[in-house]
Image (cartoon, coloured by chain):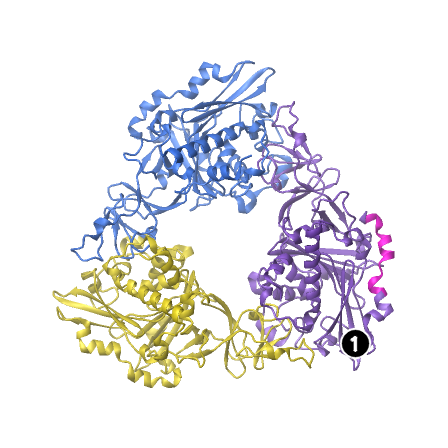
Chain colours: A blue, B purple, C yellow
Amino acid sequence: MLSHEKNAILTQSGPGQPMGRFMRSFWIPAMTAREVPAPDEAPVRLQLLNENLVVFRDSAGQVGVLEEHCPHRGASLFFGRNEEGGLRCVYHGWKFDVEGGCMEMPTEPSTSRMRHNIKAKAYPARIAGGLLWVYLGEARPVPVLPAFGFLGLPPEQVYASRWHQECNYAQAMEGELDSAHVGFLHRMVSQVDTDHQALTGKYFQEDTAPAWKILPGEAGFMACNGRRVDGDKRYWRLNQFLLPFYTMIPPRPGDAQLVRMWVPMTDERCWVICVTWRPEAPLGAQELAAWRNGENSHRKVIPGTTTPVEHKDNDYLIDRQLQKTVSFTGIHGIRAQDAMVTESAGPIADRTREHLGSSDLAVVAMRRTLVEAATKCAESGAAPAAVAKPWLYTVYATQAVLPQGMEPDAADEIIQAARARAPQAAANRQEIA
Amino acid sequence: MLSHEKNAILTQSGPGQPMGRFMRSFWIPAMTAREVPAPDEAPVRLQLLNENLVVFRDSAGQVGVLEEHCPHRGASLFFGRNEEGGLRCVYHGWKFDVEGGCMEMPTEPSTSRMRHNIKAKAYPARIAGGLLWVYLGEARPVPVLPAFGFLGLPPEQVYASRWHQECNYAQAMEGELDSAHVGFLHRMVSQVDTDHQALTGKYFQEDTAPAWKILPGEAGFMACNGRRVDGDKRYWRLNQFLLPFYTMIPPRPGDAQLVRMWVPMTDERCWVICVTWRPEAPLGAQELAAWRNGENSHRKVIPGTTTPVEHKDNDYLIDRQLQKTVSFTGIHGIRAQDAMVTESAGPIADRTREHLGSSDLAVVAMRRTLVEAATKCAESGAAPAAVAKPWLYTVYATQAVLPQGMEPDAADEIIQAARARAPQAAANRQEIA
Amino acid sequence: MLSHEKNAILTQSGPGQPMGRFMRSFWIPAMTAREVPAPDEAPVRLQLLNENLVVFRDSAGQVGVLEEHCPHRGASLFFGRNEEGGLRCVYHGWKFDVEGGCMEMPTEPSTSRMRHNIKAKAYPARIAGGLLWVYLGEARPVPVLPAFGFLGLPPEQVYASRWHQECNYAQAMEGELDSAHVGFLHRMVSQVDTDHQALTGKYFQEDTAPAWKILPGEAGFMACNGRRVDGDKRYWRLNQFLLPFYTMIPPRPGDAQLVRMWVPMTDERCWVICVTWRPEAPLGAQELAAWRNGENSHRKVIPGTTTPVEHKDNDYLIDRQLQKTVSFTGIHGIRAQDAMVTESAGPIADRTREHLGSSDLAVVAMRRTLVEAATKCAESGAAPAAVAKPWLYTVYATQAVLPQGMEPDAADEIIQAARARAPQAAANRQEIA
């Protein structure tokens, strides 16, 4: 349960809101690099933290992220003409560079100095790790990028995709922090998967009430959840929550690493950006093909949109017969199942009416962490510490089966795997700088 | 004319509103019995009096009506899995019985007592007379059902259907209480129907300004409207208005009885549920076929929806040529014609701008009865008397041609026909209990 | 830049708003004459200045413009039956003449006098110059029509069309007053048109920063914009702005005259009515064919609607490849290009965030003229002087190339061309009376 006030703080990301200011301290992942137009190509629209923006790349390859509306009389720069070093508003030909500087103002007399006093609102942008990052904050110099494990890797080791969800970022993200749901939402009815410790695997069904252990860190926390399995052992999963909206869940053995990013578009809609990568080797052709087809960690979208095929307005193409006989939901795809439960709570979940149990501990920890950090940021005006410590993001989600009584934080090996920050941070230093 | 304040009282049925509290004293008809899922089938959605609900039937055949959102974290139970005695939220597997009791909470440790403290909001429900009835009030024991003439009859003597209208329930209902419109809205241009005292018949055109006589009763009133016909006779129709939203109009001689129910979904939308029945014999194959096809008393809906084929967004498929030459409206179907005039006044009619005449007496009586009853209920907190007197609903709409000067309340025979309550109430006692 | 307060005055045209009251002093052009139903044909809907109306023509050919909702109980008169001298509401058969008088009230007793006390809200209407004009004000006698040059001409000399835009009338109109944009928005990339002083012609590209000279008049102003061309000459265009929402731009040599009318539907939508005419001769078959096809001055709409083919929701069918290589916008049609820039500033442009330059002088003059006039009208209650001087509207937009240093107001010939009012006003006296 959350009070109306705290729910508002958690969910509102506009420029004037505490969470909006807090998030603006961080670099914001905005789209995949392949969605960014090529040099001199037409601009694309982008909604981010309740702001309307356009993204383009100038002739030199620099990315510009500008407020959508021209500072002159408000025409949309989405219809602008991207030409020789800048984006030109087609209404009167005012032309802006990637920093918002007005390069030309042909409707003013040649003697006019007016163009020097006009700036389009522009945000620093950077392409790294297969993503476009935008910094909507005011600090200069801008911070360095968070040193995720996939930064600095060759392209063949990384795959990223983006779609959107019809609800607030926080409740979408809760669906991933919340390990307890895996034993139900994603369960197969017709068979128990005994081959590996899979999402749909037997461990999730052997014990549906995981115990939680939250290990706080400077950039978020590790949310460890443990299930009693194989007699008296514990199956521990060490999930990661990283400020302000990143989650990692442990891959199945042999699978690629992954991080998911839950980025506010508006308060009632969010981007989901998913990056999968292999730190040491190229991604396999088969897993790549599956991801491109929207399977496993990724989602299939309607071509030309960021709307998943299975979405709210078509009831996620639920098949009630399948729900009786094969899968628990009758809905195709783990991600669509997640979207269904989180979106169906409404555009912004009314958290005053909840009843939380012991399984919701990670969700509670996330809310508390974010609300406290946003409130503190609003009061002090200071950026959170994690912004200046990119290496805190070189972490992993991992899993292990431990003997009874052994806690994950006492198990050196898995904690090392989860916290193995330093080497990677060094490796990708050049891409994050 | 109605003041803004009284119009608000009349039209708002949310839980906190006077009319909302008043209506919650009564059983609310919600859908036809054949729309209720079979045991263990998938749940369906239901909007009622501004509340979002789901309806399912458990393995034992008991009907459950639950608030749509799971009390845990708000996921929609519409996507739930209906299995062995309860509806399971697919998010975390919490499982609820038809009374909202939490049967299982598998994400809590086996020692937890939490499930005993959690209830999904559940409303008593009953299937009777071919309909699903829901009680959204707080009185326990719950009242008995209103003893409509069709309760307790064998299924072959009753037919029910449901559709929705895009306006407030009150103005939809006004279109039926209002007998005066029949002589125009439903008139045929090309011919005068002289065969019988039909809806489209000659009596309605012989005198288009009926006189009204309102005979109040404990559960509403009889709205008698009389037309000068055949020289100096009077054609009297005795319509029924029953609290809180029932209307009956007299069938043509030989036709089945009927009641229509004008049930708020939201303040800007309502259900129309129509029940037609024969007290003594099975319905005829021909009339049944016509009703199933959406003719006469019923409407044809777009398959898989409750939206009538002729509806607001397609201008009711009006045919202007037909309007010139055949029917007064150019719109197919008596019910679609009614919907057109009532919906076209807007989602909630602005009754401050009306100009009522002597033909509107029954409409005025209905508004006054409802607003006064709701206000009284809000002040006293007491349920209206009619709730405890189900036999008041065993009434009929009827008609007769009386000699000049004879009022309907002095005509024993027709008043008896209209008020014949007791025997029927006894007959269907077992279904209403 | 405009304050929030002044922006509200400029943009809000409801009955209670200053601009709404001001505009209601004038005749309002509402649709083309060919869109007005024939006698006894079905009525059509019309939104005007935030009011919902229906338009019909009675048996005698008189045009009626009534409030959409029947004064009885609010049913829409759009579904009414137009018969023998009046529009009959199909709900109860109340019948209204073109002045709103209630001709029949058949649901009242024959002795009732009620119909004499009921009036449907009706507005004076007139067909002239190929348009329907409606007067929504209260002055009686009503003013005469503005004596536009096309009034009184034979039909073969006039062509009118209508479509709508998805934004406030003021910002749509700004796109036409604003001559400076022509050199960009409508520019061809692939070629420079040197044949004539065309919209797409070389003069607009020779000097993209026109100088402005505003010549105020009693009914608005002439907005003269001059470009340095052909060495040291000046290409002057004399545009007209006429209260409350008329604009004229000079036709290319040999082309027809034109006026555009920017009429509020609601505050977030407007009609655009365009009239093209030849004062001395019939229109050419070729230009007529082009206009009917939505080219040049007019737009092509989706059949059965007033929605242009290229519109906001389809991004004006922008072709980015074309934008690179042929036209500046990649959007087909001068008018669609205008709509794109004005609509893309939002339903009501936020003028507090603008940055105006010297090229925006005519836009500033229009805003100031309108806001001052509306404020004055609200304070004094008096109609603006122009309402009583119809001859002020017999003006033209014209153009000329003048020697260096010669201002347009010193060039007798072109000023005479632009102000040639008297003869035309006499010629069309009979149509405007």
Residue C182 makes an appearance in the image: yes
Judge whether B418 appears above or below B357 on screen.
Answer: above
Q: Is residue B45 left or right of residue A28?
A: right
Number of marks in the image?
Answer: 1
Q: Which of B115 and A153 is in front in this view?
A: B115
Query: Residue B188: horizontal and vertical position, in percent?
Result: 67, 74
Q: Is residue B136 left or right of residue C204?
A: right
Judge whether B147 appears above or below A387 on screen.
Answer: below
Chain for numbered disc 1: B
Judge whether B364 appears above or below A292 on screen.
Answer: below
Query: Residue A273: horizontal and vertical position, in percent?
Result: 42, 36
Residue at image position (63%, 49%) is B16
Q: Which of A377 and C328 is in front in this view?
A: A377
Kind of residue at badge 1: Arg
Q: Is residue A141 magenta?
A: no
Residue C271 makes an appearance in the image: no
Magenta stretch, main secondary structure, is: helix
Of helix, strand and loop, which one carries label 1? strand
Where's the N terminus of chain A, which quadrant?
Answer: top right
Residue at image position (61%, 56%) is B269
Q: Is residue A18 left or right of residue A210?
A: left
Judge whether B225 appears above or below C184 on screen.
Answer: below
Identify the magenta region.
B416-431
Where's the C terminus of chain A, which quadrant?
Answer: top left
Q: In this view, does A139 lie to the left or right of B224?
A: left
Mark 1, other Cα within 10 Å: few <14 / some 14–19 / many ≥20: many
Query: Residue B350: horizontal and vertical position, in percent?
Result: 58, 63
Q: Nearer the viewer, residue B386 or C290?
A: B386
> Residue B102 sits in which quadrant?
top right
> Residue B107 sits in which quadrant?
top right
Query: Residue B79: horizontal and vertical position, in percent?
Result: 60, 40
Query: What residue does disc 1 label?
Result: B234
